[in-house]
Structure formats: structure tokens, C-alpha cells
Amino acid sequence: MTDGTTGRYARVRAAVIGTGLIGGSLLLRLADAGLDVVGWDPDPATRERAQLRGVVAPATIEQAVADRDVVFLCGPLPTLPHTLARVAQLTGPDCVLTDVGSTKVEVTETADRLGLTQRFVPGHPMAGAESAGLTAASPTLLAGAAWVLCPAPGAAIVAFRWLTGLLVELFGARVVPMAAPAHDSVAALASHVPHLLAGALAGATQRAPLRDAVLALAAGSFSDGTRVAGTPAERTANMLLGNRDRVLHELAEVSAFLDGLAAALRADDAPALIARYAEARAARSALLDRRFTGQSRRFAADGDHGAEVTWLRELGGAGGHLSGCQVDPGAVSYAAWLPVAD
């Protein structure tokens, strides 16, 4: 990934709606790549900060999305359905719409209800920080991120292909294709429950009689385990409530495992403790030593695209990702990567 782009996306006109941490980082990267990009935020002070960073930030959302090829919706999670509906009314049928929300089912259902499936591609870059706002944004924050996109059959696949290519070319993204419900289930354990656990540990420490002594001794395990507790509380609450049922389901699974650890500890059962921690260590080792094998797939460019969407969703569900998408006359080719079995 380099500054400037001379490929098929060089002339793309983009807009970013909502320029907080993720939206602002998107905006800055697209600007660095040399695209014609504008950013809009409902907060005038944020728009002024964007202009000070050299980015066009018009006063109205109407001005921001006019004549754009793609619009990224990056506002707070509860606002996305309304923003999607509004931006859809203000843009033409060839404008691709996508979002960066941390849950996908609700906004996908909104797109279905509004008849926007053919040009709205639900998305979620798996990157971020506990800081917030445009002042914390960086053009490199999303570089190389796993970026979920939700493909759908029919005409919608055309927008998915185009957006996949853009994210790979401009962000070096590892595009993970998944159905919206599968994303929300996976994200519950991969991202949302960790926020609950971090909040619980940090919150218990805040209430502890020897809080300052605990913090004085806190080392890497405490710091790493509580990092996301520093996320703005409203943002965390929106995320958890937006995926409540799946988060609660996965939290029950985590609680059951924790109960097993506690039972082994109460029983002074060293073998049981060792066995459970061996399980946990296997997952941690797999995370740190992920290896992939490449494959390529071709599909007819036209048709009902059912087989293509099925393969894409299965790829993401198996832990795989895309590193390229090339559309040629009559065919589309994907460069894919699948994890090697432990």
C-alpha cells in the first residue's frame, strides 16, 4: 500500500459520512491515496478539524454525497439505518454504499427493506483503538486490516466485487466475506465479549479497596486484558446492545469455561486446571502463528451468482480471506487464502 493510486480506482469520487476514529482514518487514507474524497460530520468542530488536516469537509451531507461513486457510512452504530436511508435518497443508483458498523444484521435488514441490496455492501473493518474522534485518526489505522464484507446474490455481487478490489488496493485489506448473521455471531466472541471481560476486570479494580496498590503492580497481563475498557463507554454500549442476543449467548459459553476453571481451583485439581489452560493456550498459539495456503477461483461474471456467494461465505466462515478480485470480460477471479490446519 503506497501513497497515490494509478490503478482502476484512481478516479473514484468518495465520501465519508461520520469522521470519528474509523471514519476519520478512512478519510485520511483515501486522501493520501489521491482520491477525490470529502468528509462530513454533524459536528461543525469536527468538520473544521478535517479541513485543518487538508481534507474537504462541506457544511451539508447533501454537498458531501453529491456525484460520488462510493459513500462510507461511519457514524455511531444506532444512527446507521437512518443515515443509510437518507444517503440512498441523495445518491444515484450507481453509487456504492457501505458501512463500518460493528454489527451487521440490523443495517442489512434495513437495506433489504429499502430495496438497496444491489448497491449496499455491509462492511466492518476489524481495527480500532480505545481512543476516539478525528484527533485520534490515522491514515495507517486500517492498513492490512481484516475487513468483513457481506456479499449477496444477484446484482449485489457487482458492488461487492468492486468494493473488494478497492479495499485491497487502497488499504491492503484482507477482505473476509461473510453473511451478516455469521459476522455478528463471530464478532460476539472475537470482539464484543472481550469488551465485557475487560470492563469487568477494570471495573472490579476500580471498586477494590486496594485499587492504587493493584494498579501499582499491574503489568502486561492486566494492561492487555483491560485495554479496550478504555474505549468510550457510549461506543461500547452501542456495540453490545446492537448484538445483545449473540453476545449473551457467547458470554454464557465463556462463563461456563470460567466456571470450570473455578471448580478445578476450588477442588485443588491441578490436572483439570492444566487441561483447561492447555485448551486456552492452543487458541492463543493459533492466533499468533496463523499460516495460510493460497487458492484462486473463477466464476462467470453474469448469472445468478449463487455458487459464487456460497463459496465466498464459506471462505469467510472457514477463517479465510480475499487478497484480490479481478473482473475480466465474462469472468471474475478471486485470490483467496485459507488457514492451514493446526
Image (tube, grey):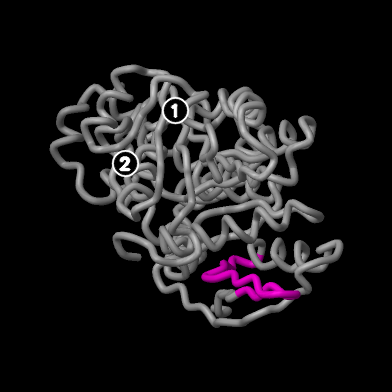
- Whether 272 is drawn above or below 22: the answer is below
156 sits left or right of 333 in the view = right
Residue at x-position 13% and y-position 37%: 216
Residue at x-position 52% and y-position 24%: 62
User: Circle 1 is placed at which residue position?
Assistant: 235
Near-viewer residue (22 or 189): 22
Percent across and percent down for residue 230 are 31, 33
Residue at x-position 62% and y-position 24%: 86
Percent across and percent down for residue 103 are 59, 38
Residue type at tag 1:
Arg
User: Quick check: is 326 in the magenta stretch?
Assistant: yes
Label 1: few (<14), some (14–19) or many (≥20) C-alpha neighbours in 10 Å: few
Can you tell which of label 1 and label 2 is closer to the viewer? 1
Residue at x-position 51% and y-position 55%: 147
Percent across and percent down for residue 311 are 74, 68
What stretch of residues is rendered in magenta? 318-334
User: Circle 2 is placed at which residue position?
Assistant: 227
